[in-house]
Amino acid sequence: MATPVGHALAGLLLGSGFTLNRPLLGYGRDLVLFVLLATAADLDFVPGILLGNPSAFHQGVSHSLGLALLVGLGMGLWGRRYGRPWRWALVGATLYMSHVVIDFLTVDTKEPLGVMLWWPLSGERYQSPVSVFLNVRRESFCREVVMHDLVTLGRELLIFLPPAGLLLWLRARRRGRYNY
Ligand SMILES: [Zn+2]
């Protein structure tokens, strides 16, 4: 898995791109929504923690195209009251799916490897043969592990921060112009 920071930045990048001229809920509330959508898949740790095995459900059905489409459907239904529900559905499915794709492209060293990318079409787990993002290590707080996780975070910041910062800046400028 990548870090929550990487996932959140990807959400801010994609969400800002989709809503550059017209927000969903409003400028600030949209940013919270984008971060929630892009990080929500890792809530799959919660049932595992309750059962004493945090990884029991990690990167299973929660990390799949099927669940991204369900989230998109839910967002579309929510967005009906605001108009243009397809925009809501698109933002919901794409931002949720960004998390799945990033984890697919991330180094994975813990069994079971990979994500259930194509569920419900397939229950197989898939991991990209070429990794773009580094994994997060959580086994201890020794210097080696901390340094590894800092490099992981640094790579994500290098990839996502420049384009996300640019789109956030553009969105903030248009916020003034369109008065939203
Ligand atoms: Zn994840």
Image (spheres, rainbow, N blue to C red):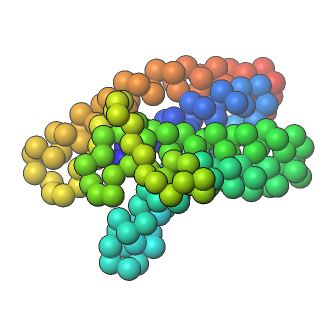
Residue 74 is drawn in which quadrant?
Answer: bottom right
Along the horizontal axis of the image, is 34 left or right of 125? right
Q: Can you say whether 4 is above or below 129 in the image?
A: below
- Looking at the image, can residue 24 be seen? no
Where is residue 148? Give x, y as percent.
19, 40
Q: Can you say whether 177 is above or below 111 in the image?
A: above
Where is residue 35? Give x, y as percent.
55, 45
State the quadrant of the C terminus. Answer: top right
Where is residue 10? Give x, y as percent.
51, 35
Residue 52 is drawn in which quadrant?
Answer: bottom left
Q: Can you say whether 138 is above or below 178 in the image?
A: below
Residue 87 is drawn in which quadrant?
Answer: top right
Where is residue 177? Give x, y as percent.
78, 20
Looking at the picture, tell me which residue is in the foreground, 123 or 17. Answer: 123
Along the horizontal axis of the image, is 26 left or right of 114? right
Please tell me which residue is depicted at 87% across the width and 50% down the height of the picture: 80
Direction bottom: furthest residue: 51
Looking at the picture, tell me which residue is in the foreground, 148 or 57. Answer: 57
Along the horizontal axis of the image, is 77 left or right of 93? right
Please tell me which residue is depicted at 60% across the width and 57% down the height of the picture: 120
Along the horizontal axis of the image, is 97 left or right of 161? right
Total count of labels: 0
Please tell me which residue is depicted at 38% across the width and 69% down the height of the picture: 56
Looking at the picture, tell me which residue is in the foreground, 154 or 133. Answer: 133
- Looking at the image, can residue 167 be seen? yes
Please tell me which residue is depicted at 89% across the width and 52% down the height of the picture: 81
Direction left: furthest residue: 143
